[in-house]
Amino acid sequence: GGASEFGPLALRHSRIPYLLCFAFQKMASALRPGVLACGILANTYVAKLYMSFGIRISGKIGTDEGANASKAQLNEAEYSGPFLAALLYLSAKGVECSYGGVIALLGQVVYTWSRIFGLPIFPIGALTRYIALPMLITSIYKTLD
């Protein structure tokens, strides 16, 4: 009975949440706020390039594809400014690790590109940004004297 019915498979699956948390923690500790800010800025830049060259110059501006890409890029631009400001501030303050920054970068990338390419996972990217912003606010608040 119980877990023994599944043998080693049950043991392996029971460790997945632990392994995901461990991997996220390692990734977050390796990515300092300044590096994360560069990631946010790079994503913004590539989204703008895509709009300029993939949509406008190719004549897709009046199409559904163009409208969707425009909405994705504009929404990404709304969040990139506050994320950049927060991450650069935390970097200037010498904060070593920012989980909110990692979540912000992942959210920006997932939202932007899944929305542009019509993948149904873009709401996940949008929601992660709602999680990231208060985490960054908390990180900034902790640095205040």
Image: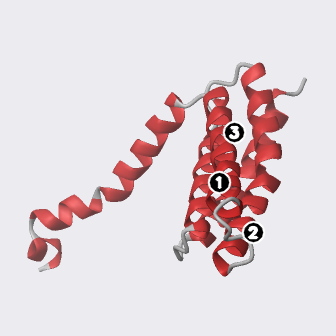
Q: Quadrant location of residue 55?
A: bottom right
Q: Which mark is residue 41?
A: 3
In the rendered view, tell whether residue 33 sits above or below residue 59.
above
Q: What residue sits 68% from the left and 34% below the top?
A: 37
Badge 2: few (under 14), some or many (20 or more) residues near its Cα, within 10 Å?
Answer: some
Q: Position of residue 138 (x, y in %)?
A: 78, 42
Residue at the disc numbered 2 = 71
- Residue 131: quadrant of the picture: bottom right
Q: Position of residue 35 (x, y in %)?
A: 61, 29
- In the rendered structure, which amino acid carries the disc numbered 1? Phe
Residue 63: x and y in percent read 69, 79
- Decide which of 38, 33 is in the foreground and name it: 38
First along the sequence among labels 3 and 1: 3
- Tell me the distance, in whole angstroms, between the alpha carbons under discs 3 and 1: 18 Å
Give the alpha-carbon distance from disc 2 to disc 3, as whole Å: 18 Å
Mark-to-mark CA distance, 2 and 1: 16 Å
Which amino acid does the dot numbered 3 rest on? Leu
Q: Which residue is mark 1?
A: 53
Classify residue 3 as left or right of residue 38. left
Q: Are marks 3 and 1 in contact (CB under 8 Å)?
A: no
Q: Residues within 10 Å of mark 1 (few under 14, many from 20)?
A: few
Q: Quadrant of the N terminus?
A: bottom left
Secondary structure found at label 2: helix
Label 3: how many Cα within 10 Å (few below 14, some 14–19, many 20+): some
Foreground label between 3 and 1: 1
Query: Quick check: 21 left or right of 143?
Result: left
Asked if residue 120 is positioned above or below residue 76 in the image, the reply reads below
Residue occupying the far right of the picture: 145
Residue 140 image offset from top left, x and y in percent: 81, 35
**Toward the viewer: 16 or 46?**
46
